[in-house]
Amino acid sequence: MPPLTEIQEGDLYFCLEERKVCVRGQEIALTVKEFDAFHLLIVNRKRVLTFETIAYHVWGEEYIDATPKTIHNLLSRLRQKLQITPDSPGYIVSVRGVGYKFDAGI
């Protein structure tokens, strides 16, 4: 079997094949769209992804219906789930008017 696609960034653990995300050893329950959005951001670390790019990759053919507000709401929920303590990093950075990026150094 091929090795798992695993990413470790400080206290954050991500595994694509197991669809698993952990922060400080605690597994975070994500919806399908939250996981897909996080996967897109984490594999494109530090790159700013536009609202349209995120919509296309997360919603597929129906991405036309996904507005920036829809994406903001999705990533806001994801951000809340990943921040298990007030001092833990945010991981997802908003780039005003453009989109979002992953950055573990926050």
Image: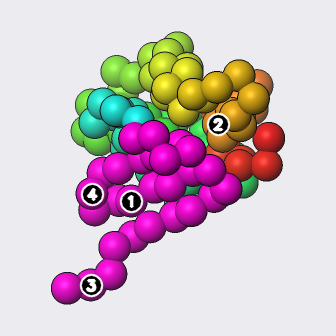
Q: What residue is disc 3 on?
A: 2
Tell me where the magenta segment starts and ends, as one range. 1-27
Q: Is residue 100 magenta?
A: no
**Looking at the rendered structure, which numbered label has been put on residue 18?**
4
Q: Is residue 75 visible?
A: no
**Mark earlier in primary sequence (2, 4):** 4
What residue is rendered at 72% in x and 54% in y?
A: 46
Secondary structure type for disc 4: loop
Q: Nearer the viewer, residue 65 or 7?
A: 7
Query: CA separation, marks 4 and 1?
Result: 6 Å
Residue that sits furthest to the front in the current view = 25
Tag 4 near tag 1, CB within 8 Å: yes
Q: What residue is disc 1 on?
A: 15
**Mark earlier in primary sequence (3, 1):** 3
Percent coordinates x, y for residue 104 in the rendering: 71, 49
Q: Is residue 96 visible?
A: yes
Residue that sits furthest to the right in the current view = 106
Percent coordinates x, y for residue 8 in the rendering: 56, 62
Percent coordinates x, y for residue 96 in the rendering: 76, 25
Query: Left of 103 or right of it: where is 3?
Result: left
Query: Left of 15 or right of it: where is 45?
Result: right
Tag 3 near tag 4, CB within 8 Å: no
Q: What residue is disc 2 on?
A: 92
Percent coordinates x, y for residue 12 in the rendering: 57, 50
